[in-house]
């Protein structure tokens, strides 16, 4: 069966969503198979995104970081393909 072998197109890739806000793009990337790190300076927006992401098993693993700057992320030296 074709559906038993379906592999989402972004499987194996890591994505960085800078300015993720409520997480709409982050969730879409996760549903397409990417491992997602999502950052936003707004702690409140990220908390809402985290809460919403818990509703879907495909989006629960998103690494949301509120109150986080691009400069802080750059210091971690993580490599993202997207």
Image: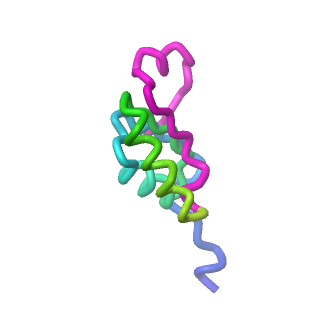
State whether residue 66 is above or below residue 25: above
Q: Nearer the viewer, residue 81 or 23?
A: 23
Tell me how many marks there are. Answer: 0
Q: Is residue 76 magenta?
A: yes
Q: Seen from this angle, which residue lies furthest bottom?
A: 1
- Residue 53, given in percent of the width and then of the height, sits at 51, 56
Q: For the C terminus, which image quadrant?
A: top left
Q: Nearer the viewer, residue 10 or 48?
A: 48
Question: What's the magenta bit mostly, secondary-structure-wise?
Answer: loop
Q: Is residue 69 magenta?
A: yes
Q: For the N terminus, which image quadrant?
A: bottom right
Name which residue lies at 50% across and 53% down.
51
Q: Nearer the viewer, residue 4 or 70?
A: 70
- Residue 21, given in percent of the width and then of the height, sits at 34, 42
| Horizontal side, residue 65 vs residue 22: left or right | right
User: Where, by quadrant of the figure, is residue 19 drawn?
Assistant: top left
Q: How is the image coloured?
A: rainbow
Name which residue lies at 38% across and 42% down.
45
- Residue range of the region highlighted in magenta in the rendering: 58-82
Name which residue lies at 37% across and 28% down.
41
């Amino acid at each position: 069966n074709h559906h038993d072998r379906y592999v989402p197109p972004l499987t194996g890739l890591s994505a960085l969503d800078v300015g993720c806000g409520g997480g709409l793009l982050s969730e879409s990337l996760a549903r397409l198979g990417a491992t997602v790190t999502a950052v936003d300076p707004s702690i409140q927006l990220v908390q809402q995104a985290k809460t919403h992401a818990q509703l879907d098993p495909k989006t629960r693993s998103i690494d949301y970081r509120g109150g986080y700057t691009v400069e802080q992320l750059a210091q971690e030296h993580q490599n993202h393909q997207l």
